[in-house]
């Protein structure tokens, strides 16, 4: 997750963050913004390469990069020429000026709240986590937790809260990113909560809010395996089941910004009760509360109902690993339902890659060979290989990095794009 690196000769290198969009495929965005994003994605890049990638004249790039340098957004960096170290003047490359802005990213979850602070080039400065009691909370209590966590992570970074240019927040549930509205979330007591506006009022900073699964996809798009892919899917399995989908190097959200709710697609009519209030959702068979519910019933663990879900699931997993047939069957059933969900993703979207992410991916029964084989059987038989599946069992810091990417995107677009063209990344 660290974009900065050092070459063998001791000089500074930069990995870059953000989508690696192929040359000449992003002509709809303002050229000034395209130049900046090309520099950000590359880490370090010569002016002539920017001009070549964007298909514009070197003179245009020189003019635009001079404007960006004057605005303090990018900088010139000496870069040794290949095979020419120590001789002559070093080549000059362009890089994002990391100190220009700092943003915070947060993930609010059912178990804990996590935050990171990154600079304008995407380098991690500090991170922190605070535990929380399970269950939905009133807005005032969530805002208290957000403010407490932000103050703590700013203190670890050695900066004042006012030094931040923006905050990104991810929550589980149904979120309209354009309006900053949380229509429903397992962490909030009320529905239709204007969380972005409320957090802005409390923090005195610009705030962007999105569904947490979208932010895992955004983290992969900016920092991880999805940087060079035009289309890929991220399926998250934790306290719920979420999905983020990248289409043409952008997060796809749907016409009302509420799409990709894989966990709430129906896999059983009149089936198990989901925490959203409906029945038969995929989440009600795969998420942690679904596994805990099955374990309490099938293993007669009523005496363990007071335990946390995390402790109960660890016990269930230990029993399965030890050969307990009932425990194994619970994970096997969840894996079969997951296979249904993944096959639907393949049949609907044909992604180049599916990433399974989240803490529950430690439970390998969910993606055992039998699960993947069943997914193959349920997917359309086209004669071509199915998309590869990668397991990324990252912790909550990855989700918080996605929230930071959301804030970076909002800050950079606000600085670079004409007002009529600013849209959520």
Image: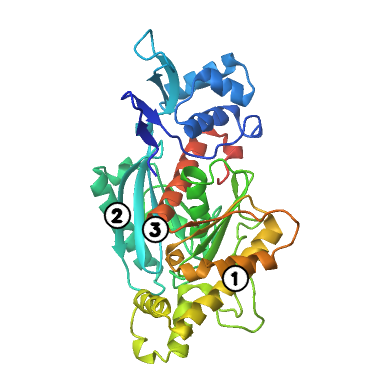
Q: Residue at x 38, y 28 (%)?
A: 13
Q: Residue at x 40, y 31 (%)?
A: 14
Q: Check the image and report above or below for 117 versus 301.
A: above
Q: Check the image and report above or below for 354 versus 126.
A: below
Q: Are marks 2 and 1 in contact (CB under 8 Å)?
A: no
Query: Residue 303, image x and y in percent?
Result: 35, 91
Residue marked by disc 2: 128
Secondary structure of residue under mark 1: helix
Query: Residue 52, image x and y in percent?
Result: 60, 21
**Foreground: 74 or 289?**
289
Q: Residue at x 32, y 62 (%)?
A: 145
Residue marked by disc 3: 396
Task: Report, in whole angstroms, how far the alpha carbon at label 2 lies from the one at label 3.
Answer: 10 Å
Task: Report, in whole angstroms, how far the alpha carbon at label 1 lies from the one at label 3.
Answer: 22 Å
Query: Residue 158, image x and y in percent?
Result: 23, 43
First in sequence, mark 1 or 3: give its number: 1
For the image, the number of numbered tags is: 3
First in sequence, mark 2 or 3: give its number: 2
**Foreground: 404 or 222?**
222
Q: Residue at x 54, y 40 (%)?
A: 19
Residue 159 location, quadrant: top left
Q: Check the image and report above or below for 64 versus 205.
A: above
Q: Quadrant of the C terminus?
A: top right
Secondary structure of residue under mark 3: helix
Residue marked by disc 1: 264
Q: Check the image and report above or below for 157 versus 97.
A: below
Is residue 41 shown left or right of residue 230? Answer: left
Task: Report, in whole angstroms, how far the alpha carbon at label 2 lies from the one at label 1.
Answer: 31 Å
Label 2 neighbour load within 10 Å: few <14, some 14-19, many 20+: some
Label 1 neighbour load within 10 Å: few <14, some 14-19, many 20+: many
């Amino acid at each position: 997750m660290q974009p900065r690196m050092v070459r063998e000769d001791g000089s500074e290198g930069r990995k870059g963050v953000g989508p690696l969009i192929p040359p000449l495929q992003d002509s709809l965005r303002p050229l000034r913004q395209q130049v900046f994003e090309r520099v950000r994605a590359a880490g370090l890049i010569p002016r002539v390469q920017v001009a070549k990638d964007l298909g514009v004249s070197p003179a245009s790039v020189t003019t635009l990069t001079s404007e960006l340098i004057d605005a303090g957004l990018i900088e010139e960096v000496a870069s040794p020429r290949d095979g020419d170290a120590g001789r002559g003047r070093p080549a000059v490359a362009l890089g994002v000026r990391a100190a220009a802005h700092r943003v915070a990213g947060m993930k609010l979850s059912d178990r804990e709240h996590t935050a990171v602070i990154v600079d304008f080039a995407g380098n991690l400065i500090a991170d922190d986590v605070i535990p929380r009691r399970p269950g939905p909370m009133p807005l005032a209590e969530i805002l208290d937790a957000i403010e407490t966590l932000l103050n703590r992570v700013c203190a670890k970074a050695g900066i004042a809260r006012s030094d931040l240019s923006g905050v990104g927040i991810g929550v589980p549930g149904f979120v309209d990113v354009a309006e900053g509205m949380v229509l429903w979330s397992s962490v909030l007591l009320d529905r239709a909560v204007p969380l972005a506006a409320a957090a802005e009022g409390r923090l005195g900073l610009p705030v962007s809010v999105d569904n947490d699964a979208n932010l895992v996809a955004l983290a992969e798009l900016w920092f991880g395996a999805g940087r060079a892919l035009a289309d890929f899917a991220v399926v998250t399995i934790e306290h719920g089941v979420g999905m983020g989908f990248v289409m043409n190097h952008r997060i796809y959200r749907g016409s009302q910004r509420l799409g990709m709710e894989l966990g709430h697609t129906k896999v059983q009519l009149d089936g198990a009760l989901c925490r959203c209030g409906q029945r038969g959702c995929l989440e009600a068979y795969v998420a942690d509360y679904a596994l805990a519910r099955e374990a309490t019933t099938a293993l007669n663990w009523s005496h363990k109902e007071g335990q946390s879900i995390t402790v109960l699931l660890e016990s269930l997993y230990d029993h399965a690993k030890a050969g307990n047939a009932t425990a194994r069957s619970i994970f096997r059933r969840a894996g079969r339902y997951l296979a249904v969900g993944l096959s639907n993703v393949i049949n609907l979207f044909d992604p180049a890659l599916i990433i399974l992410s989240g803490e529950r991916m430690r439970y390998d029964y969910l993606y055992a060979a039998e699960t993947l084989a069943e997914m193959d059987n349920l997917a359309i038989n086209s004669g071509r290989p199915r998309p590869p599946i990668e397991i990324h069992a990252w912790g909550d810091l990855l989700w918080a990095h996605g929230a930071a990417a959301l804030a970076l995107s909002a800050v950079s677009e606000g600085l670079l794009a004409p007002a009529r063209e600013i849209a959520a990344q």
